[in-house]
Amino acid sequence: MSDTRIPFSDGTLAATLHVPSGARGTVVFVHGSGVDRRDRRERHVARRLARAGFATVQPDLLAPWQALERHDAFSLELQCVRLLETLDWVGAQAWGRGRPLGLYGCGIGAAVVLLAAAKRPRAVQAVVCRDGRPDAALSWLPQVEAATLLIIDEADRAYVLAYERLGGPKELVAVPSDSHRFEEPPALEAVARHAAQWFSRHLEEGRVRAA
C-alpha cells in the first residue's frame, strides 16, 4: 500500500492505493463518519481484495476540518461529487483504464456509494455495503443497476428497506458481530471474504460498460 493524492475540482486529498500486478479491476472505498482511510477494518478488507487481484483506492473524501463538521461529514452530495471525481481519476490511470469498477462503503459511506452507483449506472459494476445507512439514499436506490451486496449484523430495518428498493441484482448477508461493528477477527474476516467473493463474481472484464 502507498499514499497518493487525488485531484478534485476544489483541491487535492490524500488516498491509500494498492495496485497488485495485473489487477483485474478496481474497488474504491468510502468510509463512514469518524473513520478514516487508516481504519484497520477497511485495511483488512482492502488487503483481502488485493489478494483476490483487485486494485484498491481508499480516499479521504473530506478534508480533516470537514470531517469534524457534522454538516459536511454527513453530506451525501459533497462526498458523492468527490467519489465520482475519484472514479474519473481511476479511469485515467494506466492500471485502472478499461478495468471494471466496484465500490465498498460503510457507515454514511454506504449511502454515498449507492448514490454514486445510481448516478453512474454504466460505470459501476458492483457494490458492497457494510452496516451504515443505505436508506439515506433511498429515493435513488431503484436506479442502482450494479450488483449490490448488503452485509449486516442483524435484521436492521434500514437495511431491509434499502434492500427492497434496490433496482439491480442484490443479496443480503448477515454476519454475526458481538460489537455490531465487525471488529472481532472472525466477523471482520467474514466481511472481507464475502466482499472478495462478490467482487470476484461481478467485476469481470467482459462487463465493462461505457460511462
Image: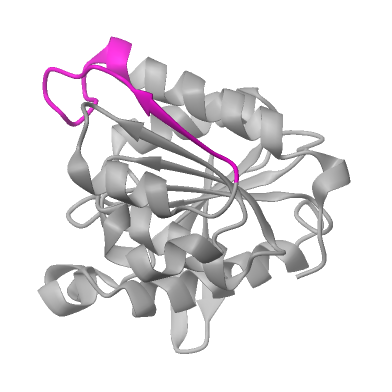
Q: Residue 112 placed where, x, y %?
A: 39, 63
Residue drawn at the location 27% of the way across and 40% of the way down = 131
Spot occupied by residue 89 in the image (x, y as percentages of width and height) = 65, 69
Q: Which residue is drawn at 32% across and 71% down?
A: 62
Along the line of sight, which residue is nearer the eye, 52 or 210? Answer: 210
Rendered image quadrant of residue 211: bottom right
Stretch of the chain drawn in magenta? 169-187
The structure residue drawn at horizontal position 34% and vertical position 64%, both measured from the top left corner, is 138
Name above or below for residue 93 compared with residue 72: above
Residue found at x 26% / y 50%: 107
- Horizontal side, residue 178 vs residue 163: left or right: left
Q: Quadrant of the N terminus?
A: top right
Indicate whether 88 appears above or below 150: below
| Residue 5 in sight from this viewpoint | no
* 172 or 189: nearer the viewer: 172
The answer, for residue 136, to whether it is visible in the render is yes
